[in-house]
Amino acid sequence: AQLMVNGVPVEVHGVNRHELEPTTGRVVTDAGMRRDLELMKQHNINAIRSCHYPDDERWLRLCDELGFYLVDEANIETHGYGAEFQGGFDKSKHPAYLPEWKAAHRDRISRLVERDKNHPSVIIWSMGNECGNGPVFHEAYTWLKQRDPSRPVSFEQAGEDVDTDIVAPMYPGLNSMRKYAEATDKTRPYIMCEYSHAMGNSNGNFQEYWDLIRAHPHMQGGFIWDWVDQGLATKTPDGRPFFAYGGDLGGYHMQNDENFCANGLVAADRTPHPGLLEVKKVYQDIRFEAAQPASGRVTVINWFSFKDLNEYNFRWELLRNGAVTKAGTFAVGPLGPRQRQEVKLSLPALKPEAGAEYVLNVFAQTKTAAPLLPAGHEVAREQFTLTPATTYFAAAPAPA
């Protein structure tokens, strides 16, 4: 099985997003929300999980307007009592296993559904986060599927239990993913609710995740943890600005989360961190392959679910030791979703040259302005090395 939108399989190029702005805290502004979506669109992100509560309804209206997929999550988390897959806990005291908590859970889930059911951007419901998986959630899932049979439910705490339509783990390793991908008895799509934790110098091995995902149709992506560093704009005593977190605003000598709320692909002021460029590259829906790139033959792959590539211009450049020596454009299309086409670039003949490295770069850019994207915006790129390493290093000095 696959996650489909209007009957078409989709890839989830997702992030988790907390509501936070550096000067207003949890009070978000129209301009701030639009800026988030602009940055996401420009970096090939197409889906957002609301973590771990329903977002301001203005956010949903913007996502309806601007074309994003949403996982809409109920504000339920009882992590302090324990969570599935994170060590043992006392089920006799856990709200997910106690009938007296059934009404409270149903109330939060039903209010989410009734408020947001008419937003087309909402394609998946989530019943909560790190909140156990007892009879309370089995009952809530049954109610939810009766109330809205049109949308799937993604519930990480269920694992592969009956109360989730999508297997949605947190931070699986590649071996775990491969085991699910290659199993012959798995019937549900696999979309990670959290992965590629973006704290510090992070998002490594991102391409390896997606090589595995794209090799198996039911492996359909995931949501990076997370979008923005949760820091608050403040100043040092001598007036220097910085983003406060942990105990910076008082109580630093007491228990606090230190920098564990600074996990974002962007800083609190939305300055991109380096990992965001890796995410953009791997998430791109236009891909290029070349078995023998020096021949100028390149295969263009349209991995969009709904778009033709006639909306884009394509260009190439040839570099010698980092300097552009020749450049040009090339035509693609019409090329529909999930199709590929070989094109021939007008590359000059290259002769092996000691100490010279030739590299071919290819790019896809928007022809005209679109919502959140200016004309000429780069949506995809690829680089091919044309020079054998043995040639490039032929002129290297002999070791002393």
Image: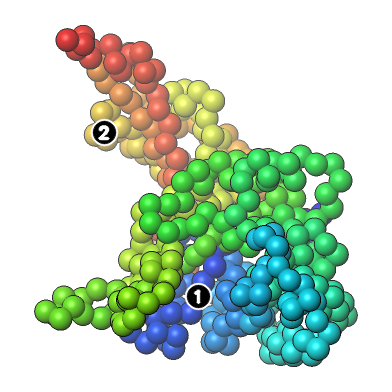
| Label 2: which secondary element | loop
Instruction: Please determine whether, in this image, residue 287 is positioned above or below residue 221.
Output: above
x and y percent of residue 277 in the render?
40, 53
In the image, 148 versus 17, the foreground residue is: 17
Residue drawn at the location 40% of the way across and 27% of the way down:
385
Residue drawn at the location 33% of the way across and 66% of the way down:
271
Which quadrant, please, contains the N terminus?
Answer: bottom right
Instruction: From the viewer's perspective, tell me whether residue 272 is left or right of residue 12.
Output: left
x and y percent of residue 174 in the render?
62, 43
Total numbered badges shown on the rendered structure: 2
Q: Can you tell which quarter of the image residue 121 is in?
A: bottom right
Residue drawn at the location 77% of the way across and 72% of the way down:
91
How is colour applied across the structure in the image? rainbow
| Label 1: which secondary element | loop
Q: Disc 2 designates what residue?
A: 322
Instruction: Please determine whether, in this image, residue 343 is positioned above or below residue 13.
Output: above
Q: Disc 1 designates what residue?
A: 18
Residue type at mark 1: give it. Answer: His
In the image, 384 versus 152, the foreground residue is: 152
x and y percent of residue 84 in the render?
71, 64
Residue type at mark 2: give it. Answer: Gly
Residue drawn at the location 16% of the way across and 75% of the way down:
240
Q: Are marks 1 and 2 in contact (CB under 8 Å)?
A: no
Crowd band around label 1 with a 10 angstrom C-alpha radius: few (<14), some (14–19), many (20+): many
In the image, 189 versus 360, the foreground residue is: 189
Instruction: Please determine whether, in this image, residue 328 is positioned above or below residue 238.
Output: above
Instruction: From the viewer's perspective, tell me whether residue 77 is left or right of residue 249.
Output: right
**Residue 109 can be seen in this image:** yes
